[in-house]
Image (cartoon, helix red, strand yellow):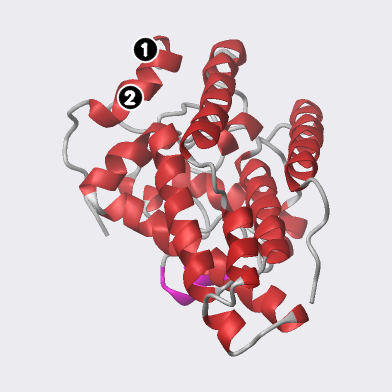
Amino acid sequence: MLQLPTSPETIRLSLFVGLFSLLALAELIWPRRLLRVAKNRRWLANIGIIVTDSLVVRLLFPVLPITLAATAQANSWGLFNLIPVTGWPELIAGLVLLDLIIYLQHRLFHRIPLFWRLHRMHHTDLDLDVSSGTRFHPLEIALSLLIKMATVLIFGISPLTVLLFEITLNATSMFNHANLAIPLSIDRWLRLVLITPDMHRVHHSVIPKETDSNFGFSQPWWDRLLGTYRDQPKEGHTGMTIGLHEYRNQQELGFWRLLRIPFESAPVRRTL
């Protein structure tokens, strides 16, 4: 049985800080787009959201997916523990399953108006960079955690698999939101196995048909297999407009406004 390393939260935090810093530096050296709004105001809001999300998770979830996975494993709960599926087969199956669940969750958050109220805060960012990869409303984070915990419990996914998935999801979210220029010759091949910044940037276009595409965070297969893949934005990566039509004033998108967005009225958007 694959064992869970000690101090998983320490591992996650160390990797988060290290990768965030590395990508932030890379963006300065190899930017893909010129930023259209002041970074200091955006980063103040986005980092404030990161801190708030962390506090909400600690307050509302005394049991996290990794702890739940360990409990399920100890009590033989869930499909993988009943069959049983262990070792590398469980690790691979668990990672693929969790990735598919996140893809489907993302599509539902765009399709169902109530969920879109939570998720649209993420799309109000008027530029994209590494900080955008962590810009999710605390209520969306809480709902996403509940979905992941239900998946872990139903399928009996191991603690190590959950830890590796959480690390991968966090890392790929920062990477594919990064304002990072990758040579097109490399991007063309890289996006066959990993969602690249150019691929995910299409998802943040102000054009609804482009917003409702490229839903994956880690693996690009689901978009291709399930018909939601879009290769390039209509206006090109340097000419496209990022964000939502109804939220165009950065001066009104500070930290407190972002927290209020789910409770504001807004036009009903087109769904898939």
Q: Residues within 10 Å of mark 1 (few under 14, many from 20)?
A: few
The mark tally for this picture is 2
Q: Vertical placement of 250 versus 127: above or below?
A: above
Is residue 173 in view from this perspective? yes
The quadrant where residue 134 appears: top right
Left or right of residue 72: residue 271: left
* Residue at the image position 43 percent from the left and 73 percent from the top: 226
Q: Residues within 10 Å of mark 2 (few under 14, many from 20)?
A: some
Left or right of residue 128: residue 20: right
The kind of secondary structure element at disc 2 is loop
Left or right of residue 16: residue 219: left
Magenta: main secondary structure equals helix
Kindly identify the amino acid type of the residue bearing the numbered disc 1. Answer: Glu
The picture places residue 1, in percent across and down from the top left corner, at 79, 77
* Residue at the image position 69 percent from the left and 56 percent from the top: 163
* Residue 252 circle label: 1
Marks 2 and 1: in contact by CB < 8 Å? yes
Q: Which residues are magenta?
A: 221-227
- Relative depth, front residue between 180 and 84: 84
- Relative depth, front residue between 88 and 25: 88
Kindly identify the amino acid type of the residue bearing the numbered disc 2. Answer: Tyr
* Residue 247 circle label: 2
The quadrant where residue 16 appears: top right
- Relative depth, front residue between 62 and 260: 62
* Residue 166 circle label: none
* Residue at the image position 54 percent from the left and 27 percent from the top: 55
Magenta segment includes 83: no
Q: Earlier in the sequence, mark 1 or mark 2?
A: 2
The kind of secondary structure element at disc 1 is helix
